Image: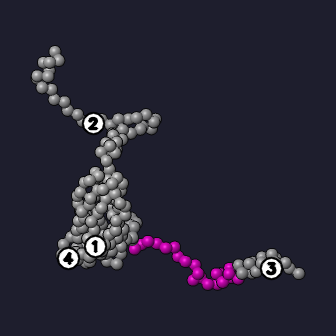
């Protein structure tokens, strides 16, 4: 008499044998490799699928606590016709960004699609604007940021950008152009 393990092994082997016979007889089970020919441009380079739409404007806006201003974005498409639908949301609480509506619709035949938002930088941190843009049946997502900084953080960031470490680990300084003007009266005092 066979035990539980022997029966299980026998059933699995029988199933695999049957499956192999079916595959050998039915050639429709063999799939051709999937090619992304739809997204290959004339140059032969692969292009990521998605809507042919771009969001122009600042990637990151740096603002000081208490600063108020405007964020301006423009939607660009390959064709100047059709309808663009935009959904905007804000994440983060460092800047209050005034969004009149969560969804916008633009008819491109009436001119370029422009979005203008007012902001009020209230606390240190980063707020993100998330854009979801639909055009001609496809969609793309974009993220823009408002980074609220203080004076010290901005100066530290500028100082770090002036120095880098070389491959040996030693600090390397970038040469910066400088100009000195000497007035005749100050030259007389040093002599």
Q: Which residues are magenta?
A: 17-38
Identify residue for label 1: 101
Q: What element does badge 1 sit on? A: loop
Relative to 38, 10 lies left or right: right
The disc label shown at residue 142, or none: none
**Helix, strand or loop: magenta stretch:** helix
Residue found 40% across the figure and 74% down from its top: 38
Residue found 27% across the figure and 65% down from its top: 98
Q: Residues within 10 Å of mark 1 (few under 14, many from 20)?
A: few
Up the image or down, 175 lies above or below 40; here it is above
Residue extending farthest left: 184
Identify residue for label 3: 7
Q: For residue 114, what is the image quadrant?
A: bottom left
Q: What element does badge 4 sit on? A: helix
Quadrant for the C terminus in the image: top left
Residue found 26% across the figure and 59% down from its top: 120
Q: What element does badge 2 sit on? A: loop
Q: CA distance from mark 4 to mark 1?
A: 22 Å
Is residue 39 a member of the stretch shown in magenta? no
Q: For residue 105, what is the image quadrant?
A: bottom left
Identify residue for label 2: 176
Q: Residues within 10 Å of mark 3 (few under 14, many from 20)?
A: few
Lower sequence index among marks 1 and 3: 3
Q: Position of residue 129 (x, y in %)?
A: 33, 64
Identify residue for label 4: 109
Is residue 21 a member of the stretch shown in magenta? yes
Q: CA distance from mark 3 to mark 4?
A: 71 Å
């Amino acid at each position: 008499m066979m035990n539980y393990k022997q029966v299980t092994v026998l059933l699995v082997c029988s199933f695999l044998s049957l499956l192999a016979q079916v595959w050998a007889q039915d050639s429709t089970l063999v799939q051709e490799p999937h090619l992304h020919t739809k997204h290959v441009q004339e140059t032969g380079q692969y292009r990521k699928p998605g809507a042919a739409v771009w969001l122009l404007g600042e990637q990151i806006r740096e603002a000081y606590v208490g600063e108020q201003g405007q964020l301006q974005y423009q939607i660009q498409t390959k064709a100047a016709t059709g309808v663009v639908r935009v959904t905007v949301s804000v994440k983060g609480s460092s800047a209050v960004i005034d969004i009149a509506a969560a969804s916008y619709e633009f008819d491109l035949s009436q001119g370029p699609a422009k979005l203008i938002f007012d902001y009020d930088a209230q606390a240190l941190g980063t707020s993100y604007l998330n854009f979801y843009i639909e055009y001609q049946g496809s969609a793309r997502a974009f993220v823009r940021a408002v980074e609220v900084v203080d004076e010290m953080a901005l100066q530290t960031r500028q100082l770090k950008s002036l120095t880098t470490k070389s491959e040996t680990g030693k600090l390397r300084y970038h040469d910066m152009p400088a100009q000195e003007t000497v007035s005749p009266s100050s030259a007389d005092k040093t002599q």
